[in-house]
Amino acid sequence: MAKYEIIFIVRPDVAEEDVAKLITQLEGAVATSGGKVEKVEKMGRRRLAYRVKRQREGYYVLFLLEGGGETVKEFERRLKVTDTVIKFLTVRIDEQLRREAKMKELRAKQEARRPKPKSAASPPVSGTQGAAQV
Amino acid sequence: MGTARVVGSEGERPPRREGAPAGPGGPRKQYFRRRKVCKFCTEKIDIIDYKDVKLVGQFISERGKIMPRRLTGTCSPHQRLLAEAIKRARNIAFLPFTTST
């Protein structure tokens, strides 16, 4: 099962409760199509960089979900059908996440390797300290 | 003699170019320009998130174009990721395609 990140823009003139309703609907759709919602984030109103469906502002909502192509297909179909949603973007993120984890691991390894020369260099320091104490 | 003159003339030309073309400690160090390093490497950003408008937005020109590597100093792996991130950000109206309005 892949992980996806779907971000969509709701018209700014839609009431907050309606957005919440839409979100719960979408969550239900994900569940019925065998997916799992990991996170929902309302990013809030933002200015759009260009006009979309005559709107200059938009309300951004971000979904992180896990599921197959069916889930995404259904999700996107619903977004298309919903008139209040003016734009959406789906990005598959599991490979990105894997890459990030790998880089972190690599970095941790490097960090672990680096201190060794330092520890090798530290004895003289302690030696000088000892000398200072004497 | 002749070759030496050529080297001298070359030494005068560089100001247009950035970075240090000669090897380390080369004698042609007449001008100094800060060496540009990849922002993403120095800040250890593995994944360039298109949602981070503040970060990604630094790498577009006033007209909304993606800035070339030679101006920003981004390394090539990161430039590729950056280009992708900018295109995604444009798609979802975080960044402009153009700024003609």
Image (cartoon, coloured by chain):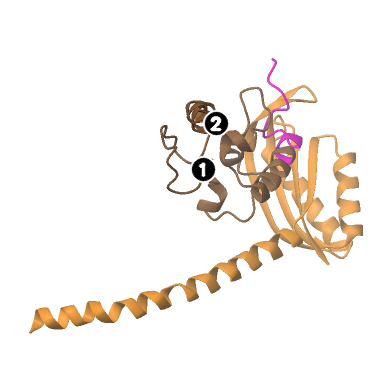
x and y percentages locating residue B26 in the rendered image:
45, 44
Tell me where residue B56 sits by quadrant.
top right
Residue displayed at 66% across by 22% down: B63
Q: Amino acid at mark 2?
A: Arg
Q: Is residue A17 above or below residue A91?
A: above
Q: Which chain is brown?
A: B
Residues shaded magenta: B88-101
Mark 1 secondary-structure assignment: loop
- On residue A13, the disc is none
Number of other residues with Cα within 10 Å of mark 1, as a class: few under 14, some 14 to 19, many 20 or more: few
Q: Position of residue B43 (x, y in %)?
A: 51, 52
What SS does tag 2 mark? loop
Residue B17, which numbered label?
2
Q: Is residue B13 left or right of residue B79?
A: left
B36 left or right of A49 in image: left
Name the residue at the left extreme.
A134
Residue at the image point whose x is 15% and y is 83% from the top:
A130
Q: Which chain is orange?
A: A
Residue picked out by circle 1: B22
- Is A22 drawn above or below residue A69 in the view shown? above
Q: Nearer the viewer, residue A12 or A65?
A: A65
Say yes or no: labels 1 and 2 on the same chain.
yes
